[in-house]
Image (spheres, grey):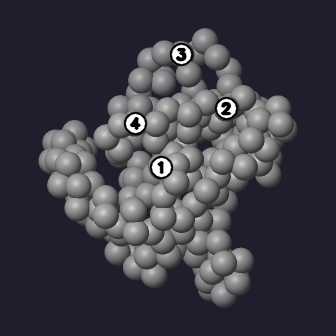
Amino acid sequence: VEDPIGILIVNGFGGIKEAYTDLDTTFALNGRRSISFKPIRKQGFRGRLDIRHRVNPLKLHSQGAYAVMRAVQEEHGIEQFDVAGHSLGGVAGTDVARHHPNLVRSLILMGSAGLEDHNLAVMASRVPAFLRDELVPALPILRERHGSSTIVKEFEYLLESPSRTLTEMIAVSRADITNRVRLVGQLGVMTAALQFNED
């Protein structure tokens, strides 16, 4: 380990843990304490009734990332994190950094939602190309690397809570985090953004 700061990978929409194995491994091979996690898809009865989750469907993803950070702190003594958020994970990671800047050294936004002028119509128009060019070609690769259960996990992610999947999809398509990212920088968290031409 060359850097004692942990790096937390926050999943994008539809991003099962196995989709980030290569990134996780690369961080580890480069001397980083890398953490990835299975995104939370279900809530308890009280959580489902909590109006804050209906108003902000992305709140659960942020809470899940923060809970992982706290667990890693307690179990492994890692005091601070670099948060690497992909797509929806960029929105969630920004919220974690905004609410807990003392835990976050840097925020790395990788193909993050909310940094460009998009809306539900724009994102909906990208779905066919995403399915054809990204999701469908990725499934056989994931199956080859992690077994057939990977396909099941992807469908579980999408179908375990269809209402959550739909509301998250709408919320992330309308997200605008530019002001929040500026605020995070003002709070002393270093920020960087990697936007991908084909994402």
Q: Which residue is mark 3?
A: 31
Q: For the point 23% across and 61% down, which residue is it? A: 128
Q: Which residue lies under the disc numbered 1?
A: 87
Q: CA distance from mark 1 to mark 3?
A: 25 Å
Mark 1 or 4, nearer chain start: 1
Residue at disc 4, secondary structure = loop
Q: Which residue is mark 2?
A: 191
Please state which amino acid type lies under the numbered disc 2: Thr
Q: Is residue 70 left or right of residue 166?
A: right
Q: Position of residue 151 (x, y in %)?
A: 23, 58
> Which comes before the other along the chain, label 1 or label 3?
3
Looking at the picture, which amino acid does disc 4 mark?
A: Phe
Single out the mark in the foreground, 1 or 3.
1
Q: Position of residue 28 (x, y in %)?
A: 48, 23
| Residue 102 falls left or right of residue 95 | right
Q: How many angstroms separate mark 2 from mark 3 (CA)?
A: 20 Å
Residue indicated by mark 4: 196
The amino acid beneath tag 1 is Ser
Mark 3 to mark 4: distance in Å? 25 Å
